[in-house]
Image: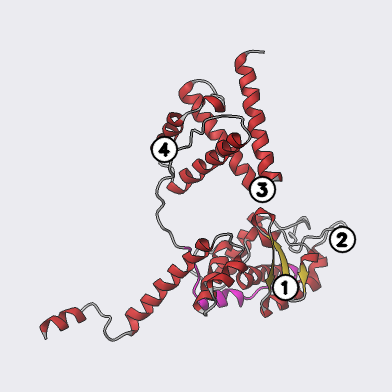
Amino acid sequence: MSSTGANNRQHGEMVRGFLAFLEVEKGYSGATIRSYSTDLEQFDEYLRRVKRKLETPSRINRDHVRGYLADMHRRSLSKTSMGRKLSSLRAYFKYLIKHKLIVRDPMVGIRNPKQEKRHPQVLNVDQAVSMMEAYVEPDPEGLRDIALAELLYGSGLRISEALNLDLNDLDSDVIRVVGKGSKERIVPLSDAAVKRIRRYMEQRHALIQDGNYAEQALFLSIRKGKRLDRRQANRIVAKLARLAGLPKDVHPHMLRHSFATHMLEAGADLRSVQELLGHERLTTTERYTHLDMQRIMQVYDRAHPLSGAGHGDDFDKK
């Protein structure tokens, strides 16, 4: 076997070992692991394009990474995408260093592009309520759709968490949720969600096909009677938003953002909201406080008699 073939095989084994580490040790989801794999493949493609060969990890240096970053800039990738791809490389080379597969980390001194601060898109309370009260047919499909929306908004679940729920995760007025990193948490259900889920459960059996009563997924698809997937869930939320006459392009994660924002607006403490959302870091939850402050300032500007733009001029005239 040629040295090139041996190097390629060695590199492939390193990547497979890294992806297995993410799955077994870190407990990452299949979608997250595929994202890491894609990022590593794209870096390899760049090296083949500019070096006309695939460099082994031990030969990759900081200049290779800098060149890749410059290439992403030339291709006008978003700063978020660039940051994610560099983070994937950083995690990969850190793994190789830890397992003594390389001795030099080419990511040292490489920083992610400075991100623009973007606040989550949220519905206001009236919009959220109108969406939860949108008329749906009282059939298995309609009852499922509104139950899913109530769960996303009423408990602040990630869409992946909601779709991964099984029947035995339900317990009266709480649910057991498996979040990122396979971490479990107990989340309360709103009264509305309890009622919606109960009504849906009364007709859930109608979605089961071919007598497959062993299917444990809470939310089932209409056509196959299998677990509802993310694409179908996106369509469900968008449909409910249209039925409620909302002007925005509403997606499932917007309901989670709305849950967090409305909880903080109502006086919930930051730590409790962090626990409900399953955030590992408090700073992730804190972004909703910035959003809440924006709303408070808007209310102040509209309501306070001394907040108008012309008041400074009046003061100067005195």
Query: In the rendered image, which residue does mark 1 sit on?
Result: 174
Query: In the rendered image, which residue does mark 2 sit on?
Result: 213
- The image position of residue 189, as x and y in percent, is 68, 74
Residue 88 vs residue 191: left or right?
Answer: left
User: Which circle's residue, 4 or 2, is located before the other in the chain?
Assistant: 4
- The image position of residue 286, as x and y in percent, is 49, 66
Give the quadrant of residue 174. bottom right
Vertical arrangement, residue 232 with respect to residue 96, above or below: below
User: Which circle's residue, 3 or 4, is located before the other in the chain?
Assistant: 3
Query: In the rendered image, which residue does mark 4 sit on?
Result: 75
Q: What element carries label 3?
A: loop
Give the quadrant of residue 182. bottom right
For mark 3, does the 10 Å Cα neighbourhood hold few (<14), some (14 to 19), or many (20 or more) residues? few
Front disc: 2 or 1: 1
- The image position of residue 301, as x and y in percent, is 32, 79
Front disc: 3 or 4: 3
Residues at discs 3 and 4 in contact (Cβ within 8 Å): no
User: Which circle's residue, 1 or 3, is located before the other in the chain?
Assistant: 3
Q: Is mark 4 on a helix, strand or loop?
A: loop
Q: What stretch is highlighted in magenta?
A: 120-140
- Amino acid type of the residue tagged 2 in the rendering: Tyr
Residue 6 vs residue 292: left or right?
Answer: right
- In space, the residues marked 1 and 3 are separated at their CA atoms by 26 Å
Q: What element carries label 1?
A: strand
Residues at discs 1 and 3 in contact (Cβ within 8 Å): no
- Amino acid type of the residue tagged 3 in the rendering: Lys
In the depicted view, which residue is nearer to us: 132 or 15?
Answer: 15
- Amino acid type of the residue tagged 4 in the rendering: Arg
Is residue 198 located in the magenta-colored stretch of the structure?
no
Query: In the rendered image, which residue does mark 3 sit on?
Result: 26
Front disc: 2 or 3: 3
